[in-house]
Amino acid sequence: MEIKEQLKQDEQLLVQVFKLEKFINKYKKHLIIAAVILIVYVIWQASYSYIKTQELIKTNNAFDELIVNPNNKKALETLKENKKLYELYLLRESKNLNKISTPELKEFAAYKMAMQKGDIKTLENYLLNPDYKVLKDAVRVALIRAYIAKGNRKRALEISNDIKPNSKFADIAKYLLHYGIIK
């Protein structure tokens, strides 16, 4: 009985092998083309990834060089190849802040410009922008300081009420309002 089952299984295996051979012979060209396309795609993907990694390394090295030597023109030109990193450099150096267009950096550039100007209108405009979320409490503290300097304690108090109680800037706002210290 066991031998009969073994022979039956061997027969089924041979039938499957013949079916597979027939399938391979029938679609041989298609299978070869698919395998070549797959190999070319894998090689292309690996090459593309390698090239992009090398470009990132090159621009990161240029960024590091500019930190050490801001007058290096060659490093600056290399850095311009990576828009986000170049804009980060502009933000770090406070140069051409209005040229920054990367959404992640735009808010920080607007914050720097508002703080550099330091006038009430610019700071108020920063607060009114719904896209800016991260640095609003810092701008509120600057506004409180500006309003206290102008003698408008009431408006300074209104702005301090907008600062979240768990914010790091809440205590600073309290001290400014309480002591009215402005330098």
Image: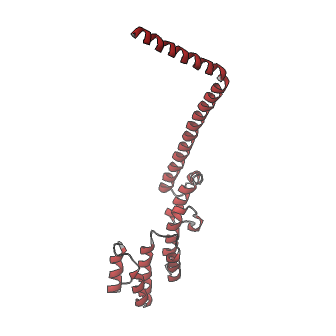
- Depicted 4 relative to depicted 127: above or below: above
Residue 33 image-quadrant placement? top right
Q: Residue furthest front?
A: 1
Residue 139 left/right relative to 82: left
Task: Tell me if 130 is positioned left or right of 36 in this view.
Answer: left
Number of numbered discs visible in the structure rendering: 0
Question: Residue 27: x, y in percent?
Answer: 65, 24
Q: Is residue 146 visible?
A: yes
Judging depth in this view, the residue of 155 and 79 nearest the camera is 155
Q: Nearer the viewer, residue 164 or 84?
A: 164
Residue 29 is situated, as x and y percent measured from the top left of the image, at 67, 24
Position of the C terminus by quadrant:
bottom left
Give residue 88's position: percent from left, percent from top: 52, 59
In the image, 76 versus 90, the foreground residue is 90
Q: Pinpoint residue 102: horizontal percent, then vertical percent.
A: 56, 61
Q: Is residue 17 above or below residue 141?
A: above
Compared with 44, 62 (above or below) is: below
Q: Which image quarter: residue 26?
A: top right
Colour pattern of the rendering: secondary structure
Rendered residue at 51%/75% (across/down): 126
